Image (cartoon, rainbow, N blue to C red):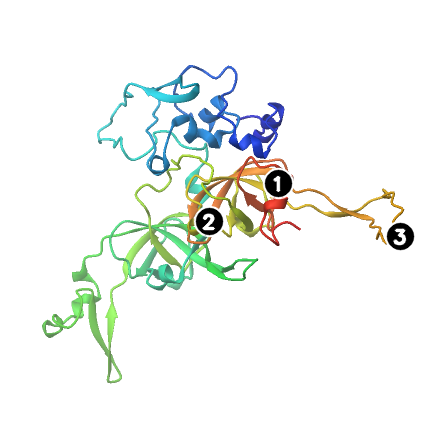
């Protein structure tokens, strides 16, 4: 979408107000009655062809909560048809899409064939701060060494890991800092940064240290362990897993953690929707540890699954008002009236963001649109609110 979503909303006369929240779903004038999905289309872009508020796509699609998690399939070549049921707009599919299959069978029941947004999700994920809890870190595999005694590694380097449970590709990350809620000061988890990707290599045990194993050890040790004796002391030694650095987006170091790469990693196929509950969140971190960010960058919020957020939740971003000095003098003849020279400017909406990764009380969101730099301490809440109502209904301490 080439224009700011917020500008479009204002131009269409859809200024956020409490009554508007209860209005029937409105479709843009000139929205296509039939639309053939093309290669390169995104769900957000198609939504914008029909709606001033693309996050209301589930209402147009008549999707329930379960379908949001496992949405309808939309593939290039498929025809979307707009119709009306009891006066309400409904968007549906015409027939079954024809999908050209290559040598491997393509699953048609696992999600969209088009992305939600036109983003490089691999890079976005790898370059954005994420979060994990202590239990996830406790038994996570670790890089232990590399060739030539080096402590830092790059693409193509051979490295060795401990605790790798199975063959495959792994994401490399390290802990940045503890994340705390700025309001409650409660611990939210570990803020981590991904630095690259490694893959396992075959290592026949017959040619490595396991050749030291003795027959009498078979019942006492795992197949990748053996006893070593030094100065009369015997201890157990495990065999490290050889790996190769497939991609390094930043320096990879000995001691970094490993996370098994999900099979669907790199896909950004979720249905944008507004949260079911009222959300009042604060931005507690932004991409790359900088103080402010803009469109297509990641922010971290102090609310998560337990607070009603899930993948695809769309939130408006708001900036707090400021106390400024006023030259206006209030006419008042009451001698007990205490004059003030200060006023508070209202909270203002500065953008939209979509949640793509969630924890219990923390989540990551990508900024979709912004008309100003988004900063730590800015607010995130349900879209489409009247700003004055937002200020009055917010929890104590949210709006200052």
Q: Residue at x 27, y 30 (%)?
A: 108
Lower sequence index among marks 3 and 1: 3
Side of 253 relative to 237 (left or right): right
Farthest bottom residue in view: 232
Q: Quadrant of residue 137?
A: bottom left
**Label 2 belongs to which residue?**
363
Q: Tell me if mark 1 has few (under 14), some (14-19) or many (20+) residues whose alpha carbon lies within 10 angstroms of its own.
A: few
Q: Residue at x 63, y 44 (%)?
A: 391
Q: Quadrant of residue 309?
A: top left
Q: Residue at x 42, y 33 (%)?
A: 116
Camera-side residue of 349 and 254: 349
**Label 1 belongs to which residue?**
389
Q: Which element carries disc 3, helix, strand or loop?
A: loop
Task: Measuring from the top left, give residue 217's x and y in whole percent.
Answer: 13, 73
Q: Pointers 3 and 1 in contact (CB under 8 A)?
A: no
**Label 3 belongs to which residue?**
335
Q: Pointers 2 and 3 in contact (CB under 8 A)?
A: no
């Amino acid at each position: 979408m080439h224009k700011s979503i917020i500008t479009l909303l204002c131009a269409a006369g859809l200024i956020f107000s409490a009554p508007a929240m209860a209005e029937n779903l409105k479709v843009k004038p000139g929205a296509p009655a039939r639309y053939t999905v093309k290669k390169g289309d995104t769900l957000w872009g198609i939504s914008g062809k029909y709606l001033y508020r693309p996050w209301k796509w589930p209402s147009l699609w008549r999707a329930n909560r379960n379908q949001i998690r496992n949405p309808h399939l939309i593939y290039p070549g498929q025809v979307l048809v707009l119709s009306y049921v009891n006066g309400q707009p409904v968007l549906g599919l015409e027939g079954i899409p024809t999908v050209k299959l290559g040598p491997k069978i393509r699953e048609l029941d696992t999600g969209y064939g088009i992305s939600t947004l036109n983003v490089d999700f691999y890079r976005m994920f790898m370059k954005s701060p994420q979060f994990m809890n202590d239990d996830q870190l406790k038994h996570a595999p670790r890089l232990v060494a590399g060739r030539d005694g080096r402590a830092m590694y790059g693409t193509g380097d051979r490295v060795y890991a401990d605790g790798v449970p199975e063959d495959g590709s792994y994401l490399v990350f390290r802990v940045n800092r503890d994340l705390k809620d700025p309001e409650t000061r409660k611990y939210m988890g570990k803020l981590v940064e991904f630095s690259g990707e490694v893959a396992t290599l075959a290592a026949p045990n017959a040619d490595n240290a396991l050749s030291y194993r003795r027959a009498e050890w078979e019942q006492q040790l795992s197949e990748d362990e053996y006893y070593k004796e030094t100065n009369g002391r015997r201890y157990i030694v495990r065999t490290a897993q050889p790996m190769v650095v497939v991609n390094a987006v930043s320096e990879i170091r000995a001691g970094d953690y490993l996370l098994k790469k999900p099979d669907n990693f790199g896909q950004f196929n979720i249905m944008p929707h507004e949260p079911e509950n009222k959300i009042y969140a604060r931005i507690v971190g932004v991409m790359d540890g900088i103080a402010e960010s803009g469109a297509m960058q990641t922010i971290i919020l102090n609310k998560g699954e337990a607070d009603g957020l899930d993948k695809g939740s769309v939130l408006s971003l708001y900036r707090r008002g400021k106390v400024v000095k006023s030259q206006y003098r209030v006419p008042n003849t009451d001698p007990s009236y205490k004059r003030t020279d200060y006023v508070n400017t209202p909270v203002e909406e500065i953008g939209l963001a979509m949640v793509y990764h969630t924890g219990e009380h923390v989540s990551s969101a990508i900024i979709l649109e912004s008309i100003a730099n988004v900063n730590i301490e800015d607010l995130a809440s349900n879209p489409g609110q009247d700003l004055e109502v937002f200020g009055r209904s917010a929890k104590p301490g949210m709006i200052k």
